[in-house]
Image (spheres, grey):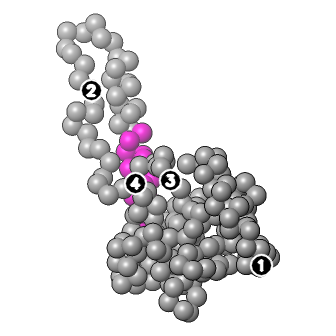
Amino acid sequence: MKAATRRRWSATCAGIAILFLVVSMTSANTTSAEPVVPASTGAPGLPAGLPSLPALGEVMQRDLRTGLAINGFDPVSYRLGNGPSAGLADHELIHEGIVWRFASQANLEAFRDAPGVYAPAFGGFDPTGVANGVAVESDPSQYAIIGSRLFLFRSAENRQRFLQGAALLAQAEDRWKSVLRFVAR
């Protein structure tokens, strides 16, 4: 289990325990002479730096098992010419409630300084699916950089179709806001 995931599970379990204590304290017999003090007065909240679960503003596609954006691939590595590389647990950054991994500290800092440059378009969803009005998960190894934007695709066929059909990008741009409303967050 990854460190960020472990911290989220620990924080969630602690929150559930506190909620259980508060509910049990408030449902206790209130006819006694002593006032009931809520259990949460001295209980710590979530540790600083953890994203809320679930994050309501979350847009980026992420692995549901690990919580990692683009399956743990380093988004900066796509721009370095050697293709995508896996990020390392030592170089994690939580950005807008999503855990991102990077191959190096330099890549992490580059992303932190300009996330809009490195984050994939359409939240990492396949743009051919977005053009059809649906959010389709992508495979981070199937990608294209067009202009200054990174696009991730579900398959090599979708990638090829997108590259050959210039109208698909315009369709995806037009439909992204409506697709975004239905993305599970």
The dot on residue 63 is none
Q: Amino acid at mark 3?
A: Glu
| Span of residues in magenta | 3-16
In which quarter of the view is residue 154 placed? bottom right
For marks 2 and 4, give the one nearer the viewer: 4
Mark 2 and mark 4: span between their CA atoms?
25 Å
Q: Amino acid at mark 1?
A: Gln
Say which label, 2 or 4, has the lower sequence index.
2
Say which label, 4 or 3, has the lower sequence index.
4
Q: Nearer the viewer, residue 169 or 68?
A: 169
Q: Residues within 10 Å of mark 1 (few under 14, many from 20)?
A: few
Under circle 2, the secondary element is loop
- Predominant secondary structure in magenta? helix
Q: Is residue 92 visible?
A: no
Give the residue at mark 4.
Answer: 51
Under circle 1, the secondary element is helix
Where in the figure is residue 155, as x and y percent of width and height? Answer: 75, 74
Give the residue at mark 3.
Answer: 58
Give the residue at mark 2.
Answer: 38
The residue located at (68%, 78%) in the rendering is: 142
Mark 1 and mark 4: span between their CA atoms?
39 Å
The residue located at (44%, 53%) in the rendering is: 9
Give the residue at mark 1.
Answer: 164
Under circle 4, the secondary element is loop
Q: Nearer the viewer, residue 122 or 91?
A: 122
In which quarter of the view is residue 30 placed? top left
Mark 2 and mark 1: span between their CA atoms?
63 Å
Under circle 3, the secondary element is loop
